Image: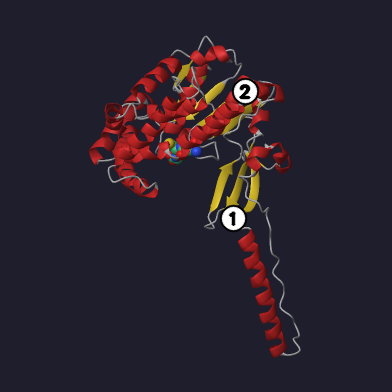
Amino acid sequence: MNFLARKAPQLALVYSTTVSRLPKTLSVRLKSSSAPKRAGSYFKLGLTGVAMGALVGTGYTIHQQNNPKDHFVNETFFIEELEEIPEIKPSRQMKFSEDHSNLKLTLFQYQTCPFCCKVRAFLDYYGVSYDVVEVDPVLRQSIKWSEYKKVPILVAKTPTGYQPLNDSTMIISALASYLKDSGKSMAELVQCFPFITFTDDEGVKKKEIMNKYFLMLSNQQYKKENDKSLSDERKWRKWADEVLVHTLSPNVYRTREEAFQAFNWFSEVGEWEQHFPSWERNLIIYVGASAMYLVGKRLKKRHNLKNDVRQSLYDQCNVWVSEIKKKGTTFLGGQQPNLADLAVYGILNSIEGCVAFKELLENTRIGPWYLSMKQAVSAHQGAKFV
Ligand SMILES: N[C@@H](CCC(=O)N[C@@H](CS)C(=O)NCC(=O)O)C(=O)O
């Protein structure tokens, strides 16, 4: 079933603060003009052609100089609610007595995917119950119903069906908006995060989710929040997604041995022995570890990590620790974690059983913050704030 429906006019919902991020030019198509059937003289035609070419060329150059970053937005999508999804037995159920959200959620995930760990850190901290479906990372049968091919996918049961939410950051923003200010249903909130496709400066077609770092709050709720802390929170959530997360793979899969060790740990915490037949589990471990060892090398180059990739991981974690030290509080959010704390914690939590994590604790000052986060998340301390 096609779950990405086109409902472009609702783009009006997009908050003005994010409009500057939108590519400026909306879809433009040039009609090809038909060739003149009877040209008086080829010379005259040629001259006209040259003149037109010069005019168009000059115009285009001026236009490019004035709009060096123009893009073409081709399509806008919203994730559509589904009447049904295939019945899939959850791998486990997380039930918290603190949960008053009235949400019925299923998380399709890989246990050690940093983006899935971010979502779980959020749900656990706020004590929101959820079912987990562990997806086989090689065959991915349990998300075949979805056109979005990545995890995490969170599905919220609605009175009329199932509302999927894609992308960890969008999931967290939608859930946080719901918990802080549940005037809107999940289906309504999803409409605040349209997907757009556009062509970037290099001519590559890209997909982006608008507003994904923004909370959709009523004016009343918004007034209760502090502008500076909201923008700091967004800044550091973005840093977690765009900088910190890219230091992980080259570290976790630094050598063949570390890659193999990491996959064995993934298998243990993802309970692959329980959820997948042993041929499938072995396939994931052997194919996965070999492939990710090579991918890690490519990612190191793509994200300009240092030759000693550990140092890049340490550097970024030190940046985070210094920011908190500057604030003089336990967390970036103050005495309680905010969404940036939860994102950074979730990302680092995804490598907790790897050699890289052990060495990270030994070589940086991130330990005390990490431990405080672990306590706050496992005690569902956020439940009393929503
Ligand atoms: N921006 C997405 C990224 C999600 C993502 O890249 N997930 C990876 C797993 S860590 C994935 O599903 N990759 C495709 C695959 O495994 O086939 C998010 O924040 O959720």
User: Which mark is first along the chain, 1 or 2?
Assistant: 1
Q: CA distance from mark 2 to mark 1?
A: 34 Å
- Which quarter of the figure is the N terminus placed in? top right
- Which quarter of the figure is the C terminus placed in? top right
Examine the image and state in which quarter residue 264 appears: top left
What x and y, as percent, mark residue 360? Answer: 30, 30
* Residue at screen point 53% across, 33% down: 169
Q: Which residue is mark 1?
A: 69
Examine the image and state in which quarter residue 379 appears: top left
What x and y, as percent, mark residue 363? Answer: 28, 30
What x and y, as percent, mark residue 147? Answer: 55, 40
Q: Which mark is residue 225?
A: 2
Q: Amino acid at mark 2?
A: Glu
Query: Which of 212/112 is in front?
Result: 212
Classed neighbour count for the residue bearing mark 1: other residues with Cα under 10 Å, few (<14), some (14–19), many (≥20): few
Classed neighbour count for the residue bearing mark 2: other residues with Cα under 10 Å, few (<14), some (14–19), many (≥20): few
